[in-house]
Structures are given as structure tokens and as C-alpha cells.
Image (cartoon, coloured by chain):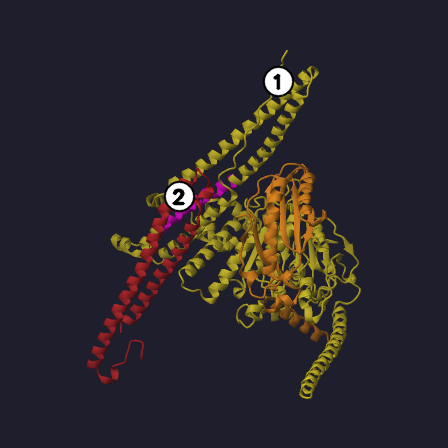
Chain colours: A yellow, B red, C orange
């Protein structure tokens, strides 16, 4: 007798969506065009016939600027309309791609189970029939549910596509653009004034922003991307939208000029350098194809012309508004906005380490202050990339930067998701200051009440001024000031009070910070100072003790702590100089001996040659 | 002589049109770089129709702005030449000591 | 004395930074630390290794972009790195890591499993491979696997090569 067991067939492969997260670049392009058209329309309106013109209508109609104002406003409205729709669509695509990935995993599992059941059936006996039929029925149920979900996925994809298609079709002629502009009643100037009147209070700004309609927010992002993108209290995603618009505008303006062989001025070239660096920092997780779509990358500050052209840029890996853990990394000497990609690389590495076990994290490379920068290739370029480094020997920039950092962190607090159970902000927020950035962060803490959960000072030349005598003076929660320094990091030997110091060395045992373990770095000599630089810039290296400890801190855990230094920081510098003097003298002696030998050998060879010559004369 | 201020205004407007043309060129590049295909197979044709329509309009705006700038520069040149001729002829006819007088004083 | 020493140290820092664009790399560690020589070596290694990884681990992998980063600001010290990943590869976290380790071992790399900031760390001839796996909320299956190839030591570039190299697509 033959018994038939109905085993479901394999579930067919699930095709990938034909749109990917990279479609976000289309949204940015559409919004950037809208911004440019908005700028032109606003300027032309201001210089065209006034709205209350009572003279001959044809005079106003024939006036070119008045006419262009109207035309560009129509185009602006069309682009604004599709930018919003495209933004929503890309969000749906990202979500549905995640759904599809989950279904692919389920399909693999179900198909494996089908294969396993078929194998079992082949090896079965009559006694197994009932059990196998039960398993086949259960498996069929699983397959049916999976297929239903796959059908639902494609229905959702189609629905999202239809909405965007309709949006494009609604404004794909100039007359439809004009109609859209006529219907647009958003008073951008009034909104801008409302924002300005809030006086920079991030909580008030966030509350106000949340009262706006989606259309009003979009209108502001298009009309004033530089303002919206860099205002603390505006949600991170909206800042990112606005700043990417500005970035795209700068890149396109300047590269178009370059492509036309018109030549860039020095200022334009500096602007382009910083814009390209910001773009590179944003692309760090996206360099793979398919990109790392799990990491939400945000351009949180973009002011490429700030600080006399050094620029201000902050790039976040992960969304600080929703992440469980947020870290702000403050870089130090030799950095400006042109080096944001390198800083981003460190921040992204920390991000990857901080999410390994299913946690959510956002790490932000914050070049939002005017660090003493240095570009050796332009050492004599003044004003420019050159001699800014001289300012590292005082704290002026750290003091000014401290206020900016504290304001930035206040903005993150204002936009952070509130835990509904406790009423507190959700994110554990860490500030990590490196090098001169640690002095800046210490000033933010001492002078401006930095609203962070922890503060970590690494490779620090000083913990911020003569008024900070111990960790408790920094105003952080008890036990939440950390410090770390490589033994051979010469910048960490500079901590001292007084006119040439930037404050105490925070790794001193009596300072009271928790001192984290850090790899010592290799010894270096004056003729190999690059090793010294390496020691100072290796705190985020893969597999380093410092990266492991920074990860723990970012996750709100306790790092591996050692006793602090008991030798004064400056004494370490003096010891190094003393040892170095001995080393150089010994080296000099060695070299002198070698030179004498060389001279002797050279002379002997010469004499030998001459003897040979003379010998030849008297056979 | 009275055209002196007028010419400056012409130059200013010409510069504004040229700047506008340059700015629109940046927008055109943004739109050129927008890859409709990234939006997926079904959406791409609609997106491309939109892009094509507005690309034409943006190019028209760019060209028009450039042409307006050129027209003002050309007019400015004509006026400057005419103004120069008039000044020279006038100076020949004026009292010697008043030849370089202007409403703002000596030029 | 201290004041003088600090000034000297800052001057030294500036000089050392400038060295990144002016020093002959051959004088500081040989060809391995020269950005261009290292890039040639690592690109070849990645092109050989990545297909094997893809075949072993499964999942949907795409392109692989490599580029230079200047470390710690404008220091003249460079790192060459290339990273990519795959979403939801089949198998548990441990199975996936074992598969990756087998491939890297076959390529002659020395392997460690640090488990703190990354899951696998492998080294060979100055090339370092770092592997991260991020887990799903079930703490068993893998949401993403990321593999990064990079220079183990800092690189120098006497001729602006690193600064102007741009991106290299290693799988296209």
C-alpha cells in the first residue's frame, strides 16, 4: 500500500526591491534644486515689482525679475512637492527592505525544513507516517503564512510606489508647478522670525518645531537649510536633511564651476575641500554595495565657511535621537573640517564596537569648534591653513569651543526620545575629548555645565584651566569622569597650570578621575617623532585597550581602570628630554666614531691606491 | 555724466543676472546627477518625465539669465561709448575751467 | 626649562606632521609603509580573499570600496581601509564567524578572537582584517556581518598619493 504525504514545495526566491536606500540621494538632489530655486525666487521677488504695485499691470508683468520670481517659485513648489514624497518613499523602501531581508531568512529556514522532511520520509517506516503527515501539515501552514507575508510585502511596495508616481505626475509641467505655488500658503519669513525669536533655547526650539506641519518643516528646510541644519533643538533627521541639501548645493555649484574651467578662488577651493571631506565622512558606512543601511548616518553640523574657513562639521553614525547610547567625540590639534573623514573613521569604528551585541548607539565626530589646526602643506598660507597651530599654546579656542560643545549637547538632549516610563531622556550620553578636544570638553563641563552622563579625557594636554583642580570640579555625576593616556603620548605630558598650561593632567592619581588602561605606545626619539604622533592618535585603533574601554564607557558600563599617574606630567616630559639628550649624544658619538672610521678607511684606501700607482712606476 | 550712476546700476543688475545663471547651473548639475533609476523600476519613468520637464525649464532659466546679463553688459558698453562721446563734445564747448566738473565734484 | 620644552615639543609635532608629505618613506620602515606600495599589496589580497569569503558565508554581498584616511587630523599619517558587509547571512553568529575564520586561516593569516571591540582579528604581512557581527535581538542570528581590511601600521605618502587616490572599487 502506498501512502502519500503532501510535502509543500520550496518557496520561490524573493526578488530584491528595485529601489534601495541609495534613492535618498535623489531626495537630496530634488531638495537641493528646490533650495536653489527658492533662493533665486526670494531674491528676484525682493528686486521685482512690489506685491502692492498699483500701476500698470503689464509693466510689472514685463519686468524680467518679477517674471523670473514667479517662474522659479513655480519650479520651487514642484520640487518641494516631490522632495517630500520622495523622502517618505525612501523611508518606506528602507523599512520594506528590512521586511524583505527577514522574509528571505524565513524562506531559507522553511526550505531547509522541507528538505529535511523529504529526507526523513525517504528513510521512514510505516510507523512514522502519522508523525510525518503532522509535520508536513505544520510545514504547509508555515509556507502559507510566509507566502501571505511575501504577497503583503509586494502590495506594500506597490502602494509606496504609487504614491510617489502620483506625486511626480502631479507637478510634471510648468503650469502644474505654478498651481502648486499658488496653493502654497506657507509663510516662510514668519516661521523664520518665530525661530529666531526663540533665542537659541534648544528645548523651546524643539517644542516649536514639533508644532509645525510637515509642509512647514519642509518649506523651512528648503528655504533656510543652513539655519535649520545647524540649530540645536531641531531633530537630528531634519538637520541631516537640511545639511545634506546645503552640502549638495555647495558640491554642485563648485564642481560645475570647476567643470566649466572657470577656476576656483582660494576661498572656493577651501569650501570645496571641506564639502568633499563631509561627503567622504557620510559615505564611510556606504562604501559597500549594498551599503550599510543599518547605520543611519547624519550630517548634524555643516558650516564649511565657519571659523575663517576652517569649517565646522559633525557627522553622526546612528541616530542620537533614538539610540540607547550616544557619544560625542571632540577632536583636537591638527584638525579642522577638512579632516572630518578621518575623525569619522574613528567614530564609525567606535560605533561598530558599541553595537556588536544588539545595542543601539550613535557616535558623533564633532568638529564644531575652531581647533588649532595645522596643514603642513600650507604652512606659510596666512590667513589660511597654515599658522593656526600657534594658538594651541593657549586655551582661547578651548574656552570658546566649550560653549559650543555644551550648546550642541543641550541640543542632543532636547531632541532625544523621552523614556515614557521614567520621563528621562533615553540616551546614555558620553562626551569623549581627545587631545586639545579634551581641554575643550573640560571647559564645556566646568564653564557651561555640560549636560552629559560621562566625560572622558584622552591624550589630554590639560583638563581646562586653573579652576579645575579635580574631577569633581567638572560637575559630572559622581564617578563619571574618565581619563586615559598612553605612557608615550607626549601631548599628555603637558598638563600644568599657569600661563603656558591648559590645566591639570587628568590622569594624575590625585586628580580623581577614573583612569582607564591604555596601551603605552612605542618609545620614540626626536629623530622619529612620527612615532610620537602615532602614540597620540591611536586611542581608537582596532583591538587597542583604549577602544575597548571607550566602548564600555559609551555603553554605560565600567571600563578597565588602573591607578593614575604618580609622576608629574611635566616631569615625564623632562625625563624624556633628559634621556633624549643622552640618546642623541651617544648617537652622535657613535656617528662620530663611524665618521672617523670612514675617514680613516677612505684615507687608507687613497694611500693604498697611491702606493699601487707608485708601485706601478717602479716595476 | 548723469549716466555715471546709471552705468553702475546697469553693471550691478548685469552681475545679478550672471550670478543667477551660475546658481541655476549648480541646480542643473544637481538635477543631472539625480539618478531616477535608484527609485525602482516602476517609479523611474515618472521620475524621469518630471526631471526631463524641469531640466528643460531650468536650462531655459539659466540661458535667459545669462542672456539678460549679456544684454545689460552690451547696453552698458553702448551707453558708455555714447556718454564718452557726449562728454568729449561737451567739453569742447564748455568754459575751460568747467570741463571736469561733475555733480559730485571733480572726478 | 619646562616652557622651553613644551615649545620644542609643539615645534616637533609640527615638524613631524610636515614629515608626512615630505619624508622619503623608504627611510622609515621600507616599502611596506609606503601608501602606494601597501595599496597594491592589499588590493591584490582583497581581490583574492573576498570571493572566497562570499562563497563560504553566503548572503548577498556587493562591491567593496577601499580608500585612505588621514589619522588624527592633518598628520601626514594614513590608514588604508576597505570595508563591506552582508545582511542576515544564514546560520548562527558562531557558525558565520567560524566560516570567516576558516577562509582567513586558509589565506595564511594569524587569527585571534578578541570578542571585545570586534569578533575576529587577523593579521598577515601588515594587512589586518577586522570582523564584526551584529546580532539580532534574539542574540543568536546575525543581522549584519562586516569585514574590514586595513593597514596594520600607519602609512606615509611622500607624493600626495594617499590624499589624491580617491576610492577604489575592489569588486568591480
The C terminus of chain A lies in quadrant: bottom right
Marks 2 & 1, CB-CB < 8 Å contact: no
The residue lying toward the viewer, choosing from A190 and A462, is A462
> Which residue occupies 69% across, 52% down?
C123
Mark carried by residue A583? none
Tell me: residue A585, above or below residue A347.
below
Residue A598: where, in percent of width, then height? 71, 79
Q: Residue furthest front?
A: A619
Indicate left or right for A93 with C42 as reference: left
Label 2 neighbourhood size at 10 Å, few (<14), some (14-19), many (20+)?
some
Answer yes or no: are tags 2 and 1 on the same subunit: no
Residue A112: where, in percent of width, then height? 63, 29
> Which residue occupies 68% across, 73% down?
C8
Q: Residue furthest top?
A: A1
Structural distance between the alpha carbons of marks 2 and 1: 52 Å
Q: Quadrant of residue A121?
A: top right
Question: Magenta: predominant secondary structure element?
Answer: helix
Label 1 neighbourhood size at 10 Å, few (<14), some (14-19), many (20+)?
some
Chain under numbered label 2 = B
Q: Quadrant of residue B84?
A: bottom left
The residue lying toward the viewer, choosing from B25 and C52, is C52
Residue B14: where, in percent of width, then height? 33, 63
> Which residue occupies 48% across, 52% down?
A245
Mark carried by residue B48? 2
**Magenta residue span:** A72-92
Residue C167: where, in percent of width, then height? 54, 54
Asked if one can make out residue A13 in the rendered structure from this viewpoint, the answer is yes
Indicate left or right for A593 with C40 as reference: right
Q: Quadrant of residue A597?
A: bottom right
Pointer 1 residue? A5
Amino acid at each position: 500500500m502506498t501512502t502519500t504525504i503532501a510535502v509543500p514545495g520550496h518557496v520561490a526566491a524573493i526578488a530584491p526591491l528595485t529601489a534601495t536606500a541609495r534613492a535618498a540621494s535623489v531626495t537630496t538632489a530634488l531638495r537641493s534644486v528646490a533650495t536653489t530655486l527658492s533662493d533665486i525666487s526670494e531674491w528676484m521677488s525682493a528686486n521685482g515689482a512690489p506685491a502692492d504695485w498699483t500701476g500698470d499691470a503689464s509693466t510689472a508683468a514685463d519686468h524680467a525679475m518679477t517674471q523670473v520670481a514667479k517662474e522659479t517659485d513655480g519650479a520651487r513648489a514642484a520640487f518641494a512637492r516631490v522632495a517630500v514624497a520622495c523622502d517618505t518613499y525612501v523611508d518606506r523602501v528602507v523599512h520594506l527592505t528590512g521586511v524583505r531581508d527577514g522574509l528571505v531568512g524565513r524562506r531559507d529556514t522553511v526550505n531547509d525544513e522541507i528538505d529535511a522532511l523529504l529526507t526523513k520520509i525517504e528513510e521512514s517506516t510505516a510507523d512514522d507516517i502519522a508523525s510525518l503527515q503532522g509535520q508536513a501539515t505544520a510545514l504547509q501552514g508555515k509556507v502559507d503564512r510566509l507566502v501571505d507575508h511575501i504577497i503583503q510585502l509586494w502590495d506594500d511596495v506597490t502602494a509606496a510606489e504609487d504614491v510617489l508616481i502620483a506625486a511626480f505626475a502631479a507637478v510634471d509641467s510648468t503650469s502644474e508647478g505654478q498651481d502648486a505655488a499658488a496653493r502654497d500658503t506657507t509663510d516662510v519669513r514668519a516661521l523664520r522670525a518665530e525661530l529666531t525669536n526663540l533665542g537659541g533655547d534648544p528645548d523651546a526650539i524643539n517644542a516649536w518645531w514639533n508644532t509645525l506641519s510637515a509642509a512647514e518643516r519642509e518649506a523651512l528646510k528648503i528655504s533656510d537649510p543652513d539655519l535649520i541644519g545647524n540649530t540645536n533643538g531641531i531633530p537630528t533627521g531634519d538637520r541631516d536633511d537640511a545639511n545634506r541639501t546645503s552640502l549638495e548645493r555647495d558640491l554642485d555649484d563648485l564642481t560645475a564651476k570647476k567643470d566649466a574651467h572657470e577656476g576656483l578662488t582660494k576661498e572656493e577651493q577651501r569650501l570645496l575641500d571641506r564639502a568633499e571631506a563631509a561627503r567622504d565622512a557620510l559615505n564611510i558606512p556606504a562604501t559597500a554595495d549594498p551599503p550599510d543601511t543599518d547605520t543611519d548616518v547624519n550630517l548634524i553640523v555643516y558650516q564649511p565657511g565657519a571659523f575663517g574657513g576652517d569649517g565646522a562639521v559633525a557627522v553622526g553614525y546612528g541616530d542620537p535621537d533614538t539610540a540607547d547610547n550616544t557619544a560625542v567625540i571632540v577632536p583636537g590639534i591638527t584638525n579642522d573640517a577638512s579632516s572630518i573623514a578621518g575623525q569619522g573613521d574613528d567614530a564609525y569604528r567606535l560605533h561598530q564596537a558599541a553595537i556588536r551585541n544588539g545595542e543601539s548607539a550613535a557616535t558623533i565626530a564633532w568638529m564644531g569648534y575652531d581647533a588649532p589646526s595645522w596643514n603642513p602643506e600650507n604652512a606659510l598660507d596666512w590667513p589660511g591653513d597654515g599658522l593656526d597651530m600657534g594658538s594651541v599654546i593657549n586655551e582661547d579656542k578651548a574656552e570658546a569651543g566649550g560653549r559650543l560643545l555644551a550648546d550642541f549637547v543641550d541640543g542632543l538632549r532636547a531632541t532625544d526620545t523621552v523614556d515614557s516610563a521614567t520621563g528621562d531622556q533615553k540616551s546614555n550620553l558620553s562626551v569623549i575629548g581627545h587631545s586639545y578636544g579634551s581641554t575643550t570638553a573640560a571647559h564645556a563641563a566646568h564653564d557651561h555645565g555640560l549636560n552629559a552622563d560621562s566625560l572622558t579625557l584622552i591624550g589630554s594636554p590639560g583638563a581646562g584651566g586653573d579652576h579645575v583642580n579635580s574631577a569633581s570640579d567638572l560637575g559630572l555625576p559622581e564617578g563619571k569622569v574618565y581619563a586615559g593616556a598612553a605612557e608615550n603620548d607626549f601631548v599628555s605630558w603637558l598638563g600644568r597650570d599657569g600661563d603656558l598650561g591648559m590645566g591639570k593632567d587628568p590622569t594624575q592619581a590625585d586628580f580623581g578621575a577614573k583612569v582607564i588602561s591604555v596601551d603605552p605606545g612605542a618609545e620614540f626619539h626626536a629623530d622619529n617623532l612620527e612615532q610620537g604622533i602615532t602614540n597620540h592618535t591611536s586611542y581608537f585603533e582596532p583591538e587597542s585597550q583604549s577602544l575597548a574601554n571607550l566602548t564600555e564607557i559609551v555603553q554605560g558600563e565600567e571600563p578597565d581602570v588602573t591607578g593614575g599617574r604618580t609622576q608629574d606630567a611635566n616631569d615625564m616630559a623632562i625625563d624624556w628630554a633628559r634621556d633624549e639628550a643622552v640618546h642623541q649624544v651617544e648617537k652622535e658619538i657613535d656617528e662620530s666614531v663611524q665618521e672617523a672610521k670612514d675617514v680613516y678607511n677612505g684615507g687608507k684606501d687613497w694611500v693604498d691606491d697611491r702606493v699601487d700607482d707608485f708601485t706601478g712606476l717602479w716595476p | 555724466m548723469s549716466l555715471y550712476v546709471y552705468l553702475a546700476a546697469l553693471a550691478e543688475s548685469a552681475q545679478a543676472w550672471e550670478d543667477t545663471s551660475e546658481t541655476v547651473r549648480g541646480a542643473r548639475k544637481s538635477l543631472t546627477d539625480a539618478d531616477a533609476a535608484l527609485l525602482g523600476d516602476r517609479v523611474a519613468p515618472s521620475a524621469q518625465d518630471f526631471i526631463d520637464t524641469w531640466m528643460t525649464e531650468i536650462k531655459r532659466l539659466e540661458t535667459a539669465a545669462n542672456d539678460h546679463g549679456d544684454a545689460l553688459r552690451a547696453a552698458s558698453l553702448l551707453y558708455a561709448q555714447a556718454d564718452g562721446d557726449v562728454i568729449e563734445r561737451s567739453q569742447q564747448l564748455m568754459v575751460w575751467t568747467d570741463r571736469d566738473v561733475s555733480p559730485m565734484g571733480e572726478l | 626649562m619646562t616652557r622651553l620644552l613644551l615649545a620644542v615639543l609643539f615645534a616637533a609635532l609640527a615638524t613631524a606632521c610636515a614629515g608626512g608629505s615630505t619624508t622619503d618613506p623608504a627611510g622609515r620602515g621600507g616599502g611596506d609603509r609606503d601608501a602606494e606600495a601597501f595599496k597594491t599589496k592589499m588590493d591584490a589580497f582583497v581581490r583574492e580573499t573576498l570571493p572566497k569569503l562570499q562563497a563560504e558565508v553566503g548572503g548577498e554581498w556587493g562591491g567593496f570600496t577601499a580608500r585612505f584616511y588621514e589619522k588624527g587630523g592633518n598628520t601626514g599619517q594614513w590608514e588604508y581601509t576597505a570595508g563591506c558587509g552582508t545582511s542576515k547571512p544564514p546560520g548562527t553568529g558562531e557558525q558565520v564567524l567560524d566560516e570567516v575564520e576558516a577562509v582567513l586561516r586558509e589565506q595564511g593569516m594569524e587569527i585571534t578572537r578578541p570578542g571585545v571591540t570586534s569578533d575576529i582579528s587577523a593579521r598577515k604581512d601588515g594587512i589586518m582584517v577586522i570582523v564584526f557581527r551584529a546580532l539580532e535581538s534574539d542574540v543568536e542570528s546575525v543581522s549584519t556581518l562586516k569585514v574590514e581590511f586595513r593597514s596594520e601600521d600607519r602609512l606615509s605618502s611622500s607624493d600626495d598619493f594617499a590624499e589624491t587616490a580617491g576610492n577604489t572599487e575592489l569588486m568591480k
